């Protein structure tokens, strides 16, 4: 039997050693993990224009992602009235780096509507075609969902989308990220009608009725799919002042 | 309280790799497999076996945690106060799991993204704690390392077998590469392959219940093949 005293000493030593070790590892790799996370987000952003990249998106590597971002992507951070923030203003909001890639859309969606800032990426193809990549966030069945939507230069046709989620069910809700065929349906749909009225894109349970403004739902994932509809409807609308200004 | 001293002196056996040591590794692979015989660690076997890649990363992580926690616990076994031994074991496992998680985050971010929740769940994997309590607390670090290795691999093999069937039948792929069958619109991978082009991916195999079916069939096959496991009572 150990005395209470020796137990307390043992536990104190153990917790100190363990916490020092973990704290050391965590801070030693902090920079690396952050870079990884940023690169992952950049790759997801490019996923929205995956069909328009000059290389195969499925086999793209980290250097290529960085290269494209450096040479072909213009970044802007917008206020809700469509005007752009300067780098310093973005950094003041707590986003070190001051670029659109540093803005956390999930954090922005928690702020009051008027104070939000929106990341915008403009991808320029070597041929000169421009794609506007907008970001949106909303909620799925279990947790948050977010995604990027690329608009063609007519500013109403979708060139592609990429979605991600925190905790949707694999095989059901998670299909919004994994099912490439489902994601491809968005390409060619429109968020404005002929008269220029905002329509967004609707995910319809049972199958799209109007292929210009609707896509098919996912069996077994109605709530996640509705979350996608809602996220697009609200999130893309925020960019309207900017889209009208160009 | 009077302290009782045990005066039995043990003659330290030299470190060797004989029949007994080999059994420490091979036993959990077959006669005493953690999943198919002891039916431990089923929860994670359901969760991470949708693809070979995830299963392989998980298997490596569990082997690492199993060996590491076994060695550390065994080295500390005389110092660990018996009243708090469970908590100490838990701290050791949790620390190693956190190390695995941080390593993946820094060096294999895509796997970390796919596995993050389940890596954390190694802490609750009954195999790891079971080995600490049953073996490492009573044996030397060397034997404990072998035992951890055997159990980790025994778990990993089953994980890979289950993942093989689930990924092949559920998505028609292995390690993310399309092998058989046509894609269908609601399947995860929609590329098509010329081999068994008529095969439509079975969505159920990607879902958790299918892991139960596969593991049950594996247990049956294992018992049919190994007569030692047949319950004669």
Image (spheres, rainbow, N blue to C red):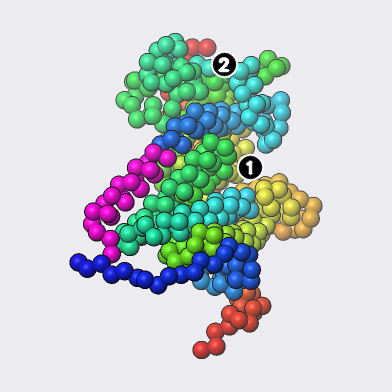
**Which of the 4 image quadrants contains residue B165?**
bottom right
Label of residue A74 in the image: 2
In the picture, which quadrant includes the N terminus of chain B? bottom left
Query: Up-down: is B146 above or below A161?
Result: below
Membership of A17 in magenta stretch: yes
Query: Up-down: is B103 above or below B230?
Result: above
Percent from the top left, x then y, of residue B24? 58, 67
On the question of residue A232 being in view, the answer is: no
Image position of B127 (left or right of B59)? left
Q: Dot 2 lies on which element?
A: strand
Q: Where are the magenta residues, as a range?
A: A1-21
**Which of the 4 image quadrants contains residue B196?**
bottom right
| Disc 1: which residue | A181
Chain under disc 1:
A
Percent from the top left, x then y, of residue A85? 43, 12
Image position of B138 (left or right of B80)? right
| Residue at screen point 44% across, 20% down | A96
Label of residue A200 in the image: none
In this view, which residue lies farthest toward the right?
B194
* Mark 2 crowdedness (10 Å alpha carbons): few <14, some 14-19, many ≥20: some
Membership of B130 in magenta stretch: no
| Residue at screen point 61% across, 18% down | A70
In this view, which residue lies farthest toward the left?
B1
Percent from the top left, x then y, of residue B61? 55, 51
Image position of A109 (left or right of B154)? left
């Amino acid at each position: 039997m150990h005395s209470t005293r020796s137990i307390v000493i043992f536990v104190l030593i153990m917790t100190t050693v363990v916490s020092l070790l973990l704290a050391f590892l965590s801070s030693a790799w902090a920079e690396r993990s952050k870079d990884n996370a940023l690169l992952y987000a950049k790759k997801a952003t490019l996923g929205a224009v995956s069909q328009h990249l000059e290389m195969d998106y499925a086999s793209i590597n980290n250097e290529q992602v960085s290269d494209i971002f450096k040479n072909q992507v213009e970044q802007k951070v917008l206020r809700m009235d469509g005007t752009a923030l300067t780098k310093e203003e973005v950094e003041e909001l707590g986003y070190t780096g001051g670029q659109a890639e540093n803005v956390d859309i999930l954090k922005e969606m928690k702020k009051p509507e008027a104070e939000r800032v929106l990341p915008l990426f403009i991808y320029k193809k070597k041929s000169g075609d421009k794609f506007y990549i907008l970001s949106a966030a909303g909620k799925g069945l279990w947790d948050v969902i977010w995604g990027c939507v690329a608009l063609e230069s007519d500013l109403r046709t979708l060139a592609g989308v990429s979605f991600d989620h925190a905790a949707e069910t694999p095989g059901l809700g998670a299909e919004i990220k994994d099912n490439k065929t489902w994601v491809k349906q968005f390409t060619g749909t429109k968020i404005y009608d002929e008269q220029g009225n905002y329509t967004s894109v609707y995910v319809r349970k049972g199958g799209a009725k109007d292929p210009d403004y609707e896509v098919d739902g996912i069996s077994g994932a109605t709530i996640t799919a509705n979350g996608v509809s809602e996220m697009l409807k609200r999130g893309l609308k925020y960019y309207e002042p900017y889209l009208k200004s160009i | 309280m009077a302290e009782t001293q045990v005066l039995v002196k043990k003659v330290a056996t030299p470190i060797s790799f004989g029949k007994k040591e080999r059994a420490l590794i091979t036993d959990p692979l077959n006669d005493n497999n953690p999943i198919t015989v002891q039916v431990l660690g089923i929860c994670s076997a359901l969760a991470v076996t949708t693809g070979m890649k995830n299963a392989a990363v998980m298997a490596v992580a569990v082997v690492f945690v199993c060996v590491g926690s076994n060695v550390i616990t065994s080295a500390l076994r005389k110092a660990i106060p018996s009243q708090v031994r469970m908590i100490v074991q838990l701290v050791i496992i949790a620390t190693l799991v956190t190390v695995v998680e941080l390593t993946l985050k820094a060096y294999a971010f895509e796997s970390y993204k796919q596995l993050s929740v389940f890596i954390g769940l190694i802490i609750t994997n009954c195999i790891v704690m079971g080995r600490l309590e049953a073996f490492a607390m009573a044996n030397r670090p060397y034997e404990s390392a072998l035992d951890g290795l055997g159990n980790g691999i025994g778990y990993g093999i089953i994980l890979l077998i289950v993942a093989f069937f689930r990924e092949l039948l559920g998505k028609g792929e292995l390690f993310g590469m399309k092998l058989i069958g046509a894609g269908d619109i609601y399947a995860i991978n929609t590329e098509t392959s010329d081999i068994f082009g008529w095969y439509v991916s079975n969505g159920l195999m990607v879902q958790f219940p299918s892991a139960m079916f596969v593991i049950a069939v594996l247990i049956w096959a294992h018992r049919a093949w190994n007569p030692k496991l047949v319950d004669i009572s």
